[in-house]
Each structure stands twice: as C-alpha cells, then as structure tokens.
Amino acid sequence: LLIDPSYDSWQEDLLKEIRQLGYEPAQVHWVLLTHCHVDHAQSAHSWRARGAKILIGDGDAHPVESGNQLVAAYGAAEGERHFTPCAVDQHVYDGDVLQFGDLTLYAIATPGHTPGSQCFKLADRLVSGDTLFIGSCGRTDLPGSDPGEMYESLTQKLMKLDDATLVFPGHNYAEHATH
C-alpha cells in the first residue's frame, strides 16, 4: 500500500523506489490518502489505473471524485494544480481498523486542515498527513478548513497518543519526531 503518493511528476521516482524495495508497481493494491489536497492526491488516478483501490476519509471523498476546488486549494506549484478526478473505493471513518495482509492500521479522523483529514496509526507510528507537522500543524485558512476542528483533532486525539509515538508528517519528509 501507498500513503499519499503525491504528484504525477514524482511517479517515476516512486516507481523506482518500489522496485528497489523488491516489489513491482502491480503489487500496490491500495492507495491511502490522508486528505484531498493535490500535493497528496494528484496521482491517485494513475494508481487506480494500475489496479490499486483508493481509500480516503469520508469528508474528502467527494472532492477527489469530482475534482472540485478543494483538491487544488493549496499545496502545489502552478503547473501541478491539475487534478484528474478519481473514483474512491473505500471511505474511511474515525476508529476504522484497516487490515492489509498482516498490517493493521487504525484510522484517526482529524478534521481541520480539510473536512476529511485522516491520520493512520500502525503500532507506535503515526502518518499524520497535514494534520500534524514537526513543530506545527496544517493550515486552517484554506477552503474547507476549520481552526476549531483542528484544535479538537490535535488536543482531543493526537495529544492523547502515547508519548513514544513516532510521527511521520506529510511534509518535512526527512524528519521525524515523537509527538
């Protein structure tokens, strides 16, 4: 599975990495999207065309399927703002337990950056998308964002995770930190 495979223009690098790990692109069966912005979801259609199923938080499914303005609201250079709408195979909700072979991921709905923002927890690791960054959080001044919901997501969900949780944010890719 892939989480937030990002821009179409980056797919060659991602395909190379997949092969270096000993897999073939056809072995990618699921693409999990933490939210609907173009810098996280632009290539979902490409992976769906390869046979992968697309999973996203319920509140962000419609923008991905329709390609509405929420998708391209932020996060891309002008040339990367194009978004090809993509069918969503599974809507995910807060508390869903997602089983992929012998991997168990837990969905944590974290609205605020977008209505359907999700984090995915695997054991002591959290993929936080744009909800939580190293030292900050995602923007809440964009279409569909809500500062009050972001505050609730951060204080009532993410701050309650174990202190040893390793955070992998949607940006600051080379960094990690415990929450």
Image (tube, rainbow, N blue to C red):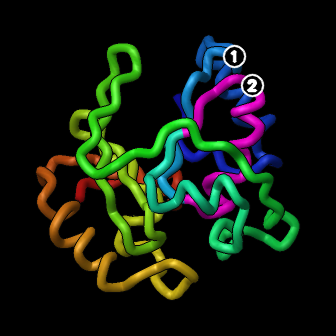
Is residue 37 a member of the stretch shown in magenta?
A: yes
Q: Determine the residue positioned at 39% across, 65% down.
A: 131
The answer to whether 97 is drawn above or below residue 170 in the figure is: above
Q: Determine the residue positioned at 82% across, 48% down.
A: 9
Q: Are marks 1 and 2 in contact (CB under 8 Å)?
A: yes
Residue 26: mark = 1
SS assignment at label 2: loop
Q: Is residue 145 left or right of residue 25?
A: left
Q: Position of residue 149 (x, y in %)?
A: 31, 77
Q: Is residue 168 left or right of residue 80?
A: left
- Dot 1: within a 10 Å radius of its alpha carbon, few (fewer than 14), some, or many (20 or more) residues? few
Q: 21 or 84: nearer the eye? A: 84
Q: 179 or 151: nearer the eye? A: 151
Mark 1 and mark 2: Cα distance apart in space:
6 Å
Q: Position of residue 169 (x, y in %)?
A: 43, 56
What segment is highlighted magenta in the picture? 36-54
Q: Position of residue 159 (x, y in %)?
A: 17, 64
- Dot 2: within a 10 Å radius of its alpha carbon, few (fewer than 14), some, or many (20 or more) residues? some
Is residue 75 a member of the stretch shown in magenta?
A: no
Task: Please state which amino acid type lies under the numbered disc 2.
Answer: Arg
SS assignment at label 1: helix
Task: Please state which amino acid type lies under the numbered disc 1.
Answer: Ala
Q: Determine the residue positioned at 31% across, 45% down.
A: 107
Q: Position of residue 139 (x, y in %)?
A: 48, 79
Q: Is residue 167 left or right of residue 53?
A: left
Q: Quadrant of the C terminus?
A: bottom left
Q: Determine the residue positioned at 46% across, 82% down.
A: 140
Quadrant hosting residue 104:
top left
- Of the numbered discs 1 and 2, the one sitting upstream in the chain is 1
Residue 50: mark = 2
Residue 12: mark = none
Quadrant hosting residue 2:
top right
